[in-house]
Image (cartoon, helix red, strand yellow):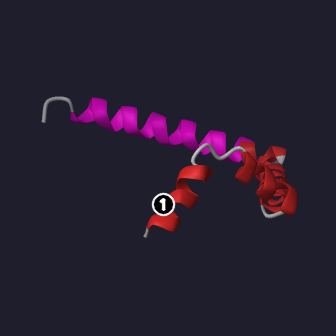
Amino acid sequence: MKFLDWYLKISVVGALIGASMEMFMIKTGFYDKVTVLETEKRAWESSPEAQAMREALNPWRNKDTEAGKGS
C-alpha cells in the first residue's frame, strides 16, 4: 500500500478533531441544554394545542376523511 501512512495520518487527525469537539460539547453543557429543549419540544407536541394546530394545518385532512368514508 503506497499511501497507507497518509490514510493513517488523516484518520488519526480526524479522530482527534472529533474527540475534541465532543469534549468541548460535554464541557460547555451542550448535551444538557439539548436534553431540556427536546423535553420541552416533546411536551409541546403532545399538548392538545399542538395537536389541534397540527390537524388544522394538515392539507390532506379532507382527503383522509374522504378515503376513510370510501372504504
Q: Which residues are magenta?
A: 4-24
**Quadrant of residue 52 within the rendered picture:** bottom right
Compared with 40, 1 (above or below) is above
Horizontal side of residue 41 vs 62, given as left or right: right
Residue at 57% across / 48% down in the picture?
60
**Viewer can see residue 43:** yes
Compared with 45, 71 (above or below) is below
Principal secondary structure, stretch drawn in magenta: helix
Residue at 56% across / 41% down in the picture?
18
- Does the magenta run of residues contain 17? yes
Residue at the bottom extreme, as displayed = 71
Q: Which residue is mark 1?
A: 67
Residue at 73% across / 41% down in the picture?
24
Q: What type is the residue that disc 1 sits on?
A: Ala
- Determine whether the residue tagged by mark 1 lies in a helix, strand or loop: helix
Q: Position of residue 57 (x, y in %)?
A: 71, 44
Compared with 44, 15 (above or below) is above
Front residue of 38 and 21: 38
Q: Position of residue 4 (x, y in %)?
A: 22, 36
Q: Position of residue 63 (x, y in %)?
A: 53, 51
Image quadrant containing the N terminus: top left
Horizontal side of residue 13 vs 61, given as left or right: left
